[in-house]
Image: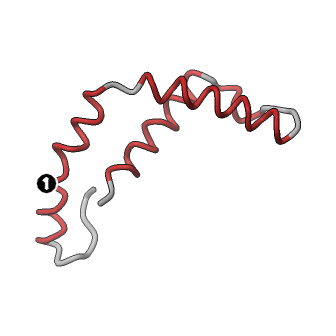
């Protein structure tokens, strides 16, 4: 139900698409953290308003589906 969960999926997909080497970064923890921070900030800024607006627009449908499912699983 939380739109941020869908946003994390978008962010992760964009990160791996733009930087496929992210899975095999080799260095100390501080360097890996530094590289990840830099790349995540860059990818975050590339997420368009259309994505955010789409997540917002999807909320009424999600609430309705959850209500109809009486709190159980939905297709979201």
Query: Quadrant of residue 75 in the image?
Result: bottom left
- The residue drawn where x is 81% and y is 33% is 31
Give the tally of numbered discs. Answer: 1
Q: How is the image coloured?
A: secondary structure
Q: Does residue 29 appear left or right of residue 76 in this picture?
A: right
Residue lying at the far bottom of the rendered structure: 70
Foreground pick, 43 / 71: 43
Q: Quadrant where the C terminus lies? A: bottom left
Mark 1 surroundings: few (<14), some (14-19) or many (≥20) residues within 10 A: few
Q: Does residue 28 appear left or right of residue 52 in this picture?
A: right
- The residue drawn where x is 12% and y is 54% is 60
Q: Secondary structure at mark 1?
A: helix
Q: Quadrant where the N terminus lies? A: bottom left
Residue lying at the far right of the rendered structure: 28
**Rendered position, 30 above or below 44:** below
- The residue drawn where x is 82% and y is 38% is 30
Give the x, y percent position of residue 26.
85, 32
Q: Which residue is mark 1?
A: 61
- The residue drawn where x is 26% and y is 75% is 72
**Rendered position, 66 above or below 71:** above
Give the x, y percent position of residue 32.
77, 35
Give the x, y percent position of residue 67.
13, 71
Q: Does residue 67 appear left or right of residue 48 in this picture?
A: left
Q: Does residue 22 appear left or right of residue 24 in this picture?
A: left
């Amino acid at each position: 139900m939380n739109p941020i969960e869908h946003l994390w999926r978008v962010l992760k997909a964009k990160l791996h698409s733009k930087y496929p080497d992210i899975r095999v970064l080799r260095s100390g923890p501080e360097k890996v953290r530094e590289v990840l921070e830099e790349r995540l900030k860059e990818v975050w800024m590339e997420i368009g308003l259309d994505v955010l607006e789409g997540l917002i627009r999807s909320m009424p449908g999600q609430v309705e589906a959850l209500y109809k499912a009486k709190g159980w699983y939905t297709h979201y």
